[in-house]
Amino acid sequence: NAGVTQTPKFRVLKTGQSMTLLCAQDMNHEYMYWYRQDPGMGLRLIHYSVGEGTTAKGEVPDGYNVSRLKKQNFLLGLESAAPSQTSVYFCASSYPSGSVGDTQYFGPGTRLTVL
Amino acid sequence: GENVEQHPSTLSVQEGDSAVIKCTYSDSASNYFPWYKQELGKRPQLIIDIRSNVGEKKDQRIAVTLNKTAKHFSLHITETQPEDSAVYFCAASIGSYIPTFGRGTSLIVHP
């Protein structure tokens, strides 16, 4: 049981390049999330998904796209990277139990630098 | 939408002292309040949570209190140790809905 994994762990891009970050979970979770973490800004939600084939915008969605073609995978795409997208990206997943409160399980993070 | 304020942004204590981190939330419908710990270079991990039907929860050296009337909740760490040094995040959510995170508190425990 690997939990939540992210690929790659590190990446350096030039302005204008594109890339895709992959998040995978083996816990059969319905909900998946992408966050970015910047110093002093906490965790800001980019996009999320409440099930296979569904996605929705979070707090800071501009410049990013996502897809959830399979329940276990959640992809985050940057079509034309900008220096402002330099950040640490965390994927998370949770299982909506229907009761109050569900723990989010985070991946190890991807450190992205855009030059 | 929900807004979560977290204070202080940095907290420095001596080993053995207590540490308190406070969060306020805006949406009175929020009923789930988790706390996450993030060590340097690692992922955030849940350390304790509280639901709105209780006022306090304790797990060894850590405790969380909730005041629904004032819409604030706090994390208390007693007998701090150097390994408690990390960034702590509070969050608030309505049931299973998307949580809103505070901006984090960097706790430094000096030996």
Image: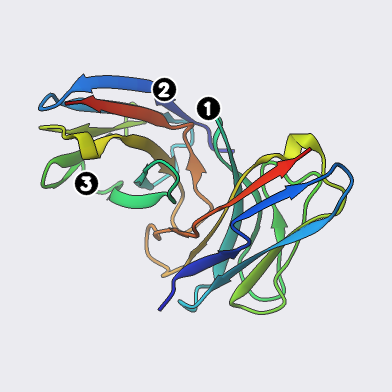
Residue wearing tag 1: A40
Q: Amino acid at mark 1?
A: Gly
Does the image show residue A2? yes
Q: Position of residue A26 (x, y in %)?
A: 49, 78
Question: What is the CA distance from the residue labelled 1 to the residue labelled 2?
Answer: 8 Å
Q: Position of residue A44 (x, y in %)?
A: 59, 41
Residue under disc 2 on the same chain as residue under disc 3: yes
How many labels were placed on the picture? 3
Q: Residue at x 79, y 58 (%)?
A: A19
Q: Chain of mark 3?
A: B
Q: Position of residue B95 (x, y in %)?
A: 43, 56
Quadrant in which the N terminus of chain B is drawn: top right
The quarter of the picture where residue B92 lies is: top left
Q: Residue at x 37, y 21 (%)?
A: B10
Task: Say if A75 sits above or below A57 in the image.
Answer: below
Which label lies toward us, 1 or 3?
Answer: 1
Secondary structure of the residue carrying numbered label 1: loop
Instruction: Please give left or right for residue A65 compared with residue B40 in the image.
Output: right
Residue wearing tag 3: B54
Which label lies toward us, 2 or 3?
Answer: 2
The quarter of the picture where residue A6 lies is: bottom right
- Mark carried by residue B9: 2
Of residues B28 and B103, the one nearer the viewer is B103
Q: Chain of mark 1?
A: A
Does the image show residue B65? no
Q: Amino acid at mark 2?
A: Ser
Asked if disc 1 and disc 2 are in contact, CB closer than 8 Å, the reply is: yes
Q: Label 2 crowding class (10 Å Cα cut-off): few <14, some 14-19, many 20+?
A: some
